[in-house]
Amino acid sequence: MAAAFGAASAAFLPRLAHRLAVGFAEPARPGCADCARPFPEGFAGWVRAGAACSCSGGYAVPVLGGAAVATILTTTVGASPELPGYLLAAVPGLLLAMIDRRCLRLPDPLVGALAVLATVPLAILRPERIGVAVVAAVAVLTTYTILAFLGGLGLGDVKLAAVLALILGFAGWPAVVVGVLAPHLINGPIAVFLLISGRRRPIAFGPALLAGALAGLALQQP
Ligand SMILES: [Zn+2]
């Protein structure tokens, strides 16, 4: 059931990612970037199951990704009261990864949605863990802010990393440590490979941060 939820919700993400993957302070894309066909006005222009536009194929990756994330969360976290919040937060999480891959941006409203969907239920269910969660978030926020000033990290990465540390803090310190280290283990080899193959280019850090948080949650659970 969780896999079906993950796949079904992810099926609506390609259109959203296509419209929202724009530069800083730019308005959402009004039409298809490939065939120039305008999207419908208002709500209807945002809702489309499947590919972003009828001209583009291939939405298997987000759908399979959504199903995989939901399955990993369900099998590792188990049927706990925390699970629905994690599953809901995975939807903006997946959308953030898709947008960051396209345009190296992590829009604040989506990071905010991820934070609210995951941390509000956690704060209600586990009020005794709020202290650890806040300390973890502040520690990551401080470290990543310094890293951002040294270069190589965007402020979007800093904010997302802090939100994920807050969420992982509710699961405990081992989850935070895995969640903080895993993104570097994921992106490090990719950066080295690009460097060696002479195709040096900026790599989105958001997908690695999100995958690391998933690993932290998954490994932490019994
Ligand atoms: Zn099109």
Image (cartoon, rainbow, N blue to C red):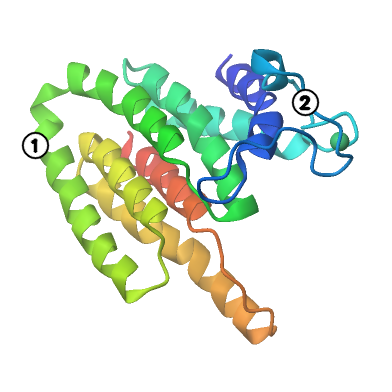
**Total numbered labels placed on residues in the image:** 2
Element at label 1? helix
Badge number at residue 131: 1
Front residue of 25 and 208: 25
Question: For the residue carrying disc 1, how many other residues have a C-alpha within 10 Å: few (<14), some (14-19), or many (20+)?
Answer: few
Which quadrant of the figure contains the N terminus? top right
Where residue 81 appears, as percent x and y from the top left, is 31, 15
Where residue 188 appears, as percent x and y from the top left, is 49, 71
Badge number at residue 39: 2
Q: Distance between the residues labelled 2 and 1?
A: 45 Å
Residue at 37 percent of width and 43 percent of height: 219
Describe residue 30's horizontal placement relative to residue 69 as left or right.
right
Q: Are marks 2 and 1 in contact (CB under 8 Å)?
A: no
Describe residue 20's horizontal placement relative to residue 148 as left or right.
right
Mark before the other along the chain sequence, 2 or 1? 2
Hey, what amino acid is under mark 1? Gly
Which quadrant of the figure contains the C terminus? top left
Where residue 140 appears, as percent x and y from the top left, is 23, 55
- Quadrant of the rendered structure where residue 15 is? top right
**155 versus 43 height, above or below:** below
Hey, what amino acid is under mark 2? Phe
Residue at 16 percent of width and 49 percent of height: 138
